[in-house]
Image (tube, rainbow, N blue to C red):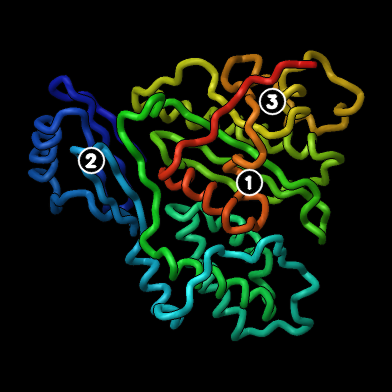
Amino acid sequence: MIWTTRRDGATLRMLVHVDDLLISGDKDAAVQAWLRTFLGRFEGNEEPAHHYIGLQIDYDRHAGRLKVHQTEFTEELLRSQGYDDCNPVGVPMEPNTYLYESDRPNIPDVALRTKYMHVVGSLLWLGQWTRPEIRFALSQLTKHMCNPGIIHWEAAKRVLRYLRGKPSDGITYTRGLPGGNQLQVYADSDWASDRDSRRSTGGHCAILNGGSVSESCKKHMGVAHSSAEAEFIEACKAALQVVWLRRILAAFGHHQKGPTPLGEDNRACILMSEASGQKDRVKHIDLRVWSLKEKVAEGVVRLHAVATNYMPADIFTKALPQPAFERHRAVLQGLARPPPMLPVVPL
C-alpha cells in the first residue's frame, strides 16, 4: 500500500508492507520532519533503505544510479543446495530446450517433488523481483511442480549453476537518461511453441529509467492460428499493463507524454492494431484482445517496429543462445540502451 501526502511544500510517499515502511520525498528536510513526527507516535527504527522485503538496494546519489539486487538471498540459496562452489554456466537453459509432460514419472517421487518445489519456489522469488532473465526457465519448471521428473530436476539445477556465475546481478536504474521517465514497452511471442498443447508462449517488458520495471512470461490461454495472431494477443496484454503503469506513474507525478511506444517485431500485428474495421482473417480472435485497437485509438499506446534480433522480450519466449541472451539481459538489467523503435508504413 502506498500513502501520499503534501507537507511543507513537499510530496511525501510511504510504501507499507506489514511492518516495513519505505519513505521518500522530494525534499530531505520535509522527510526528516515527517519521520520525527511519525516516530514520536509509533515505535520504530530509522535507517537508510539498503534492505527492503528481502531486496538489497545500492544507490549513488551523485552518479544518479540505483541498483536493486538479491545477492544475499542468492548466495544462501546456492549454499543450501550445495551449489556454492559449482561450475557456472552462461545461460539458465540450453538453447531450444522445452520441458514436457512426457518426462514426468508414472509414479510421483515425493522426495524429489519436495526438493524440486523448494528450489523452484526460491527461484520464483528471484525471477519476480531482480532476475527477469530467468523467467522463461521458470515458466518451464513451474509446469511440473506436482510431478517433476529427473529431466525437470536437472533443468532446475542448471538455473542454480547459472546463478552461481552472476549471483550479484540485479537491475540498475539511472537518473537523467534521455526520455528516462517515459515508458518503453516490448512484446513478443513464440507461436505454437508448447508441444503438449500447441499454445504460444508470450512475454513483454516495460523499461523505465534504463531498467525493467515490469515483465511477463506466460503461455497463452488458447491456440493461435498464426504468428500474427499470437503476437497480437501478447501486444494486447502488454497494452493492458501499460494502462496500469501509466496510472501509477501519474500518481507519482510522472505523467506520460503521448502514446507509450510498444515495440513489436511482427509487421502484420502492427498493421492490425491500426486497421479500421474487422477483416475476415482475424474476425475469429477473441473479442477481449481487440482492446489493443481501442488503446491505440485512444492514444494510450502506439505500436512500432523493432528488429527481431534486438527484441528484448524474446528472452521470455524461448531458451536463447548465449550471445542473444546476454544482449537482451543487458537491456533488462539497465546495462544497455533499449533497441530503437521505428514506425511502420503500410504498403
* Left or right side of 98 for 55: left
Contact flag, marks 3 and 1 (Cβ < 8 Å): no
Q: Earlier in the sequence, mark 2 or mark 3?
A: 2
Marks 2 & 3, CB-CB < 8 Å contact: no
Identify the residue position indicated by label 1 in the image.
314
- At horizontal 61% and vertical 50% (from top left) the residue drawn is 316
- Measure the C-alpha gap from mark 3 to mark 1: 23 Å
Q: Quadrant of residue 5?
A: top left
Name the spot of residue 3 as percent of width and height, x first.
30, 34
Above or below, comparing residue 249 to residue 311 in the picture: above
Crowdedness of circle 2 by 10 Å Cα count: few (<14), some, many (20+)?
some
Residue 34 visible (yes or no): yes
Say which amino acid is labelled 3: Ser
Residue at x-position 46% and y-position 79%:
86
Q: Amino acid at mark 1?
A: Asp
Numbered mark located on residue 291 in the image: 3
